[in-house]
Image (cartoon, rainbow, N blue to C red):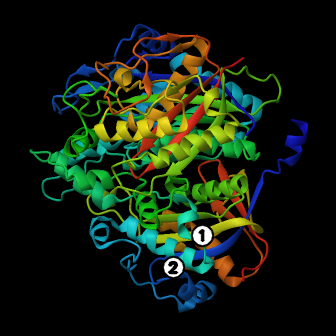
Amino acid sequence: MRPLAITHHTLVTALGHGRQATFEALRDGRTGLARRGFETADIGSWLGVVDGVDGLDDIDWREDLAAFDCRNNRLAELALRSDGFADAVRAASARWGAARVGVFLGTSTSGILQTEVAYRHRDAATGALPESLHYGETHNTASVARYVRAALGVTGPACVVSTACSSSAKVYAAAERLIRLGLIDAAVVGGVDSLCMTTLYGFKALELSSGEICRPWDATRAGLSIGEAAAFALLEREGGAAPARAMGWLLGAGESSDGHHMSSPHPEGAGAALAMRAALAQAGLRPDDVDYLNLHGTGTPGNDAAEDRAVCAVFSRSLPCSSTKGYTGHTLGAAGGVEASIALLALQHGLAPPSLNLQQQDPALHASLLREPLHKRLKVVASNSFGFGGSNASLVFGAAS
Amino acid sequence: MVADMGLLTNTLSADILGIGLLGPGMADWVGSAALLRDPALWQPTATLVPPPRRLPATERRRAGAVVKASMVVADQAVAAAGLDAAALATVFSSSTGEPANCHALCEALAGPERMVSPTRFTNSVHNAPGGYWHIAVQGMAPSTSLAAFDGSFGAGLLEAMAQVATSQAPVLLVVADVPYPAPLAAKRPTADTFAVALLLAPGQQLRLALSEETAPTPCGHAGLDALRVGIPAARALPLLQAIARGDPAALTVEGLPGMSLNVHLLTPLP
């Protein structure tokens, strides 16, 4: 495919708001995870909580968008306000026309926290949910795409992609197709997922979350640490009047299915390898052209083992790899978008961040995990995202110059 | 660059190789085409979701209604086209997802013990229909799962036709919605279960372009039109009626505020 310009990007995670705060934490090897509770849940785990969500109590929610107010859309709003992202989209909308700008966002649980809390306040006699619950605007899966589209005033095609933890990687592929085909000229892509009872207690029930901080690729890894995040990127066709400068390039996107199991990856990572090879093929690159791979790397025993086999089947074992879940936690439907942003920061700064909390690499895993920051010029960075239902996506990004 | 721009037509096209349908008084596409042509024949009985034959018994028990409805229509479309299901890329779209499962989770989380069933949590992902389908057919092709509220059929059609254009291969589109149980039902009334599958392939029968928002084409029958506006997936009905009639047609399909999809049915289907 023809490389597609990424003209702006931003993210809010447990590391802070915006690219600079994220880069500094990655550079300094500082985690955003903390052992803490969230809302009424304290299950003794480490969480990646975004600061400043409550601060939006004081903002004026546009009257026509007030019903969309929920933690998930607040995370989206925080990211729209970071690094001037909303202004960049408005400039693109002025360049191309509002109808030529699409919105494609990933989420897994959307604003389900609103409904979870509402279920604690059902009418004792009728069982009815409180009037204050705006289900369609907050919890329905499409909520964040509708909110962001309305907040930005763009009217191109839009949807949420919800394929669990690959969601916000797959939106890059969907947007690229529509731009390539000429249906739109620009797209807001990314993902938003917020902490909620469903994922905290659900991953605990599946015994996939750890009581310790997540340790991807470690011999003692015992599961994931859950985080929340919003990450956005602006993709734009080349040309047009006063074109924006690229911050990086989308070179390829690969998608596949495991067709194996709803909550466990294919043990040999066959689907994951297929997605990585498809991304490289679309980029017209060989495995050796990749300088750094951001792993999905959740820190569960099974996921890391399957991904390791897939990575070692596709790439040289010496390829520098790391999981950044030790910094942000696993941000689920936002993870692909967060790690796309991290890939772009790695390309911009020539920094491949080390994998945190790696004490002793599992001797059964053979990928080369970075324990120290790798400072070198990076030209091509790949990023993996895999989800429940056997949904796999791999993205390949190129440096701006 | 210039040469590339010359190829951009703003229009997508595809052939329809197979159709699946499940809805109130509609057990399958083959049996429903006649009543879509002549809605006076339609008996609006509640949707009956048969057990999907693709799923092994354990999965059949675990799977929710949206999974079952999706698989039933997917099977109809694949069988009509006579294609190998394992090789097909898929696009699943749904506004409701699986609300009974969501209700059970929220009820459990509102209780003092907060005991969540691992199976319910696994099945809560919006891509459960896609996941179960690819497991059942052992398919490793790409699959996506979308949601666009009342525009979920249009969003699925756009994504599937875009994939046909870029891959030049068949793509299976499945759009399904199921009613919410109380108390969620009061927040998002959904008339009944409705599911549609279109097996799309490179060709010229169907054309799609985006446009400014215009009023969607209605069904031309009060009962069917109540379904169209009462279930997001049933926004497909006017297109299905046009296909059943076999005449060229120009339709507007609901998108999101500010945009619509213009769909042209150019040549009759076999």
Q: Residue at x 55, y 79 (%)?
A: B79
Residue A26, compared with residue A184, is above or below; it is above
Instruction: Name the N-terminal-most of marks 1 and 2.
Output: 1
Quadrant in which the N terminus of chain B appears: top right
Residue A200 image point, x, y percent: 24, 38
Cβ atoms under marks 1 and 2 closer than 8 Å: no
Residue at mark 1: B198
Q: Residue at x 48, y 44 (%)?
A: A272
Residue A39 image point, x, y percent: 22, 30
Residue A224, compared with residue B13, is above or below; it is above
On the question of residue B159 being in view, the answer is yes
- Crowdedness near tag 1: few (<14), some (14–19) or many (≥20) residues, C-alpha within 10 Å: many
Quadrant hosting residue A347: top right
Element on which disc 2 rests:
helix
- Residue A105 lies left or right of residue B186; in this view the side is right
Quadrant hosting residue A208: top left
Q: Nearer the viewer, mark 1 or mark 2?
A: 1
Q: Amino acid at mark 2?
A: Gly
Q: Residue at x 58, y 10 (%)?
A: A376
Residue in front for this viewpoint, B117 or A379? A379
Residue A4 image point, x, y percent: 71, 32
Residue at mark 2: B223
Q: Residue furthest left?
A: B112
Parent chain of label 2: B
